[in-house]
Image: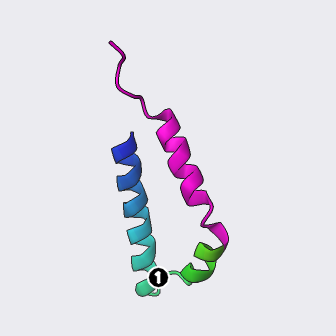
């Protein structure tokens, strides 16, 4: 799950950045990043919480 979460996050961020550069959507990424940056550590924490650990012997 941890590897998939990072991959999906990078794909979504790249697609969004490409759409903005191609002027398909008009989004102020800097403004969004300033407002919503706390969601990043929250999402990483949730992903780590639900990632199964190594089995105990």
Taking depth in this image into account, of 8 and 40 the one nearest to the observer is 40
Q: How far across and how far down the image is residue 28, in percent?
A: 58, 83
Please identify the dominant SS of the magenta region: helix
Q: Secondary structure at mark 1?
A: helix
Q: As displayed, is residue 1 above or below residue 35?
A: above
Q: Quadrant of the C terminus?
A: top left
* Residue 51 falls in image quadrant: top left
Image coordinates of residue 5 in percent, x first then y, are 41, 48
> Furthest residue to the front?
57
Identify the residue at the far top of this view: 57
Q: Is residue 27 visible?
A: no
Quarter of the view holding residue 8: bottom left
Q: At 35% across and 25% down in the image, what residue appears?
A: 54
Q: Which residues, given as a range, are shown in magenta?
A: 35-57
**Is 57 on the left-hand or right-hand side of 24?**
left
The verdict on residue 40 being magenta is yes
Tell me: 34 left or right of 8. Answer: right
Dot 1 corresponds to which residue? 20
Task: Name above or below for residue 19 compared with residue 11.
Answer: below
- Colouring chosen for the image of the structure: rainbow
Q: Quadrant of the N terminus?
A: top left
Question: Residue 16 location in percent, x, y?
Answer: 45, 72
Q: Residues within 10 Å of mark 1 (few under 14, many from 20)?
A: some
């Amino acid at each position: 799950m941890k590897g998939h979460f990072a991959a999906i996050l990078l794909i979504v961020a790249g697609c969004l950045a490409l759409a903005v550069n191609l002027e398909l959507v008009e989004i102020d990424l800097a403004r969004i990043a300033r407002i919503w940056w706390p969601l990043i550590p929250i999402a990483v924490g949730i992903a780590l919480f639900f990632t199964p650990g190594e089995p105990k012997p």
